[in-house]
Image (spheres, grey):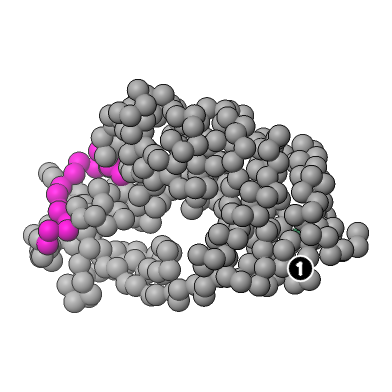
């Protein structure tokens, strides 16, 4: 297929047709595409914001979460520990807190009925322009544009956009193209098709241009250089020193983030500093990534009589928990993983 210099703006209908016909043939049967329930679609959109489709599917996060919280009414009255536990393994726990805030607003301001109007959806807490457009188009087939990372990548390439897509001018330009190219007669399929193309064909690395159904609309000669973005933050190396301290009578000592940190409400092994742990036996060493941090987590054996002192700062609290209750406590995945290894080895 040869590339031409067609302007997609002039060929919007042909562009839409090529995309939606392709989508009809290849669309993946994701569970969130089998529903038009706006609550389920909101849950999927929030879940997929920072978690890969494969992860959400493989561990049934979407179906399990909806089985627990099938409506806004159910999650609106759930405790913090319940919502954090249901989100365990997905990370970025601010997302589930925002979901609950949106559910509470739906109950309080819309009598428990998910709003149908785009402006009212956009008005819900934690819902931005992309998510509002996705819910309006996927649930109601309302002609609303969307721009997420997939769409930004496709548009930057088809228009050979040599500006930063994350600048305010770049964002404005992307939304303007999204409005211009939107298939107003078929917004659900069209928006889904754009996202599918970004996931399957116009991928970040090694886009499959020779398989692309909109190749003739695409202006870029070097897709791998687009989109242009602000340089990513450098990875920061962080060390964490944790205690594994089990008492036959009291259970295991755990620490809870009580501050407004991203892990607020979550339980983990108690953290100390390097000097407090350097003489203790090392039980486990692992690493994990969070945002732009690469964390090395070392866990040390601590005797109950000689627990290195906690500084009792206002950001964390510590308490003992029976081992039988561990499964019900929300815990960040890296800590859950290491705890399971240690408990298996010691009990
Ligand atoms: S896959 Fe290639 S041809 Fe298709 S939109 Fe992306 S860069 Fe253009």
Q: Nearer the viewer, residue 314 or 325?
A: 314
Residue that appears at 29% across and 64% down = 299
Q: Nearer the viewer, residue 24 or 174?
A: 174
Please report the bounds of the magenta region as a residue range: 313-330
Residue that protrudes farthest toward the right in the picture: 1
Residue at disc 1, secondary structure: loop
Membership of 97 in magenta stretch: no
Above or below: residue 134 compared with residue 334 = above
Position of 39 compared to 139: left or right? Answer: left
Residue 267 shows in the view: no
Residue that appears at 67% across and 68% down = 161
Above or below: residue 224 compared with residue 173 = below
Q: Nearer the viewer, residue 281 or 75?
A: 75
Q: State ligand 1's quadrant.
A: bottom right
Residue 308 coordinates in the image, percent (x, y): 13, 66
Position of 175 compared to 38: left or right? Answer: right
Residue that appears at 35% across and 23% down = 111
Ligand 1 closer than 8 Å to label 1 CB: yes
Tell me the quarter of the image containing the N terminus: bottom right
Residue 303 coordinates in the image, percent (x, y): 15, 60
Residue 153 shows in the view: yes
Q: Quadrant of residue 10?
A: bottom right
Q: Quadrant of residue 99?
A: top left
Residue 40 coordinates in the image, percent (x, y): 49, 32
- Residue at numbered disc 1: 220
Label 1 crowding class (10 Å Cα cut-off): few <14, some 14-19, many 20+?
A: some
Above or below: residue 153 compared with residue 267 = below
Total of numbered circles in the picture? Answer: 1
Residue that appears at 34% across and 72% down = 238
Position of 91 compared to 283: left or right? Answer: right
């Amino acid at each position: 297929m040869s590339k031409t210099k067609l302007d997609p703006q002039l060929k919007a209908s042909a562009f839409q047709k090529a995309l939606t016909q392709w989508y009809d043939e290849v669309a993946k049967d994701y569970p969130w595409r089998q529903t038009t329930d706006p609550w389920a679609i909101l849950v999927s959109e929030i879940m997929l914001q920072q978690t890969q489709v494969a992860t959400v599917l493989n561990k049934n996060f979407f179906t399990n979460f909806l089985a627990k919280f099938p409506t806004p009414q159910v999650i609106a009255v759930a405790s913090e520990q319940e919502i954090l536990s249901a989100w365990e393994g997905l990370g970025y726990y601010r997302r589930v807190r925002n979901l609950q805030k949106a559910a509470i607003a739906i109950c309080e301001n819309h009598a428990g009925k998910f709003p149908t109007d785009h402006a009212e959806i956009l008005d819900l807490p934690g819902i931005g322009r992309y998510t509002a457009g996705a819910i309006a188009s996927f649930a109601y087939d309302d002609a609303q544009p969307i721009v997420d990372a997939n769409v930004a990548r496709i548009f930057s390439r088809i228009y050979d956009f040599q500006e930063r897509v994350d600048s305010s001018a770049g964002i404005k330009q992307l939304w303007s193209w999204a409005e211009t190219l939107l298939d107003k007669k078929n917004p659900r399929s069209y928006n889904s098709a754009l996202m599918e193309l970004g996931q399957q064909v116009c991928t970040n690395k090694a886009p499959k241009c020779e398989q692309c159904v909109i190749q003739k609309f695409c202006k870029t000669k070097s897709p791998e250089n687009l989109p242009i973005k602000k340089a990513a933050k450098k990875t920061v190396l962080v060390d964490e020193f944790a205690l594994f301290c089990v008492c036959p009578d009291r259970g295991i000592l755990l620490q809870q983030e009580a501050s407004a940190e991203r892990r607020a409400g979550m339980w983990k092994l108690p953290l100390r500093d390097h000097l407090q742990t350097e003489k203790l036996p090392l039980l486990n060493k692992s690493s994990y990534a969070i945002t732009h941090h690469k964390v090395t987590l070392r866990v040390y054996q601590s005797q109950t009589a000689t627990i290195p002192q906690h500084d009792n700062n206002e950001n964390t609290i510590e308490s003992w928990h029976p081992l039988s209750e561990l499964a019900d406590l929300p815990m960040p995945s890296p800590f859950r993983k290491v705890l399971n290894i240690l408990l298996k080895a010691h009990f």
